[in-house]
Amino acid sequence: MLNMIVSGASGRMGSRIIALSREMDDIKLTVALERKDHEESGKDIGQVIGIGAINIKITDSITDMSEKGDVLVDFSSPSATIECLKSLSDKPMPVVIGTTGFSKDEIEYIKLYAQNTPCVFAPNMSVGVNLLLKVLSDIAKVTGDDYDVEIIEAHHRLKKDAPSGTAMKMAQVLASALNRSLEDTAVYARHGLIGERTRKEIGIQTVRAGDIVGEHTVIFGGLGERIEITHKASSRDTFARGALKAAQWVHKQTPGLYDMQDVLGLK
Ligand code: NAD
């Protein structure tokens, strides 16, 4: 039995991960972590997320976590993730990080943590998006500099980071397939008299509206034709199921930084 700690337990993702874990025989929630001032702190997480009491109270305590869990699944916020990893640094625990929007320094810290313990770090845990990442690289290697590459992503109005972690991952995969530096070629906004499109830029545009779960389109625009590839998530359960699969997988691995392509055997 795998004992699982979920950080961000009552959030949109955390709550679905906890709910779906109840359908699995080999994984059990042991700690439901939330932020310090959480209004439901001390209440039963099952009741708070609407699945009925499960005898686990929402807590903000990150002490002695290694005694309470075999794996940490984190869908919180970048600062909360780093705080949690720091508290685990004496007794590292395998982790699945789904949180997005990390700074460069924070990503360096995650890499450091992963030197001593297995860590799955993926901005998108759905099978579909991870398959897409593989396909995008194959297409870009053929279309090369002859086709303009643009990424458009859309999410719900409450999302805090932009562009999405998934769009940035797609951009990185495309830049690497095209032998470009993403830092030098990414264009995040266009406005006013901007002149002609430069050949090597990779456009990454963001839409925020209503309750969109997550949509990503990549356009390869050539002369006389274009390819458009779209992924649409219609439910957060696709990410939650991926996160649970990653939790089952990560605790059997040797230390290192992994992503969902590793978990799904797509490499
Ligand atoms: P959310 O705001 O609904 O949930 C985040 C939760 O984290 C909240 O309940 C918040 O109270 C909690 N939190 C804040 N500080 C905390 C702390 N110090 N300790 C513990 N918990 C804390 O957001 P969400 O939609 O569930 O998304 C969470 C993160 O996951 C975001 O970064 C989002 O972009 C990312 N995400 C990733 C995937 C993926 O597949 N990797 C899919 C969807 C969302």
Image: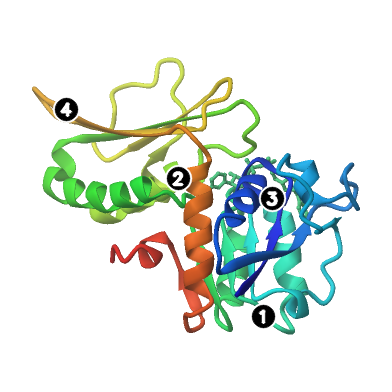
Can I make out residue 58 in this image? Answer: yes
* Mark 3 / mark 2, whichever is N-terminal: 3
Element under label 4? strand
Question: x, y percentage for residue 106?
Answer: 63, 61
Other residues around mark 4 within 10 Å, as few (<14) / some (14–19) / many (≥20):
few
Find out if the beta carbon at label 3 lies less than 8 Å from the nearest ligand 1 atom.
Answer: yes
Q: Secondary structure at mark 2?
A: helix
Few, some or many residues within 10 Å of mark 2 (<14, 14–19, 20+): many
Q: Residue at x 67, y 54 (%)?
A: 78
C-alpha span from label 1 to label 4: 47 Å
Distance between mark 3 and mark 2 Cα atoms: 16 Å
Task: Please say if 171 is above or below 54.
Answer: above
Is 224 displayed left or right of 48 in the figure? left
Q: Earlier in the sequence, mark 4 or mark 3?
A: 3
* Residue indicated by mark 4: 226
The disc placed on residue 92 is 1
Tag 2: amino acid: Thr
Q: Label 2, on which residue?
A: 166
Tell me the quarter of the picture where residue 187 sits. top left
Ligand 1 within 8 angstroms of badge 2 C-beta: yes
User: In the shown orientation, is residue 95 left or right of residue 232?
Assistant: right
In percent of width and height, residue 23 lies at 56, 55
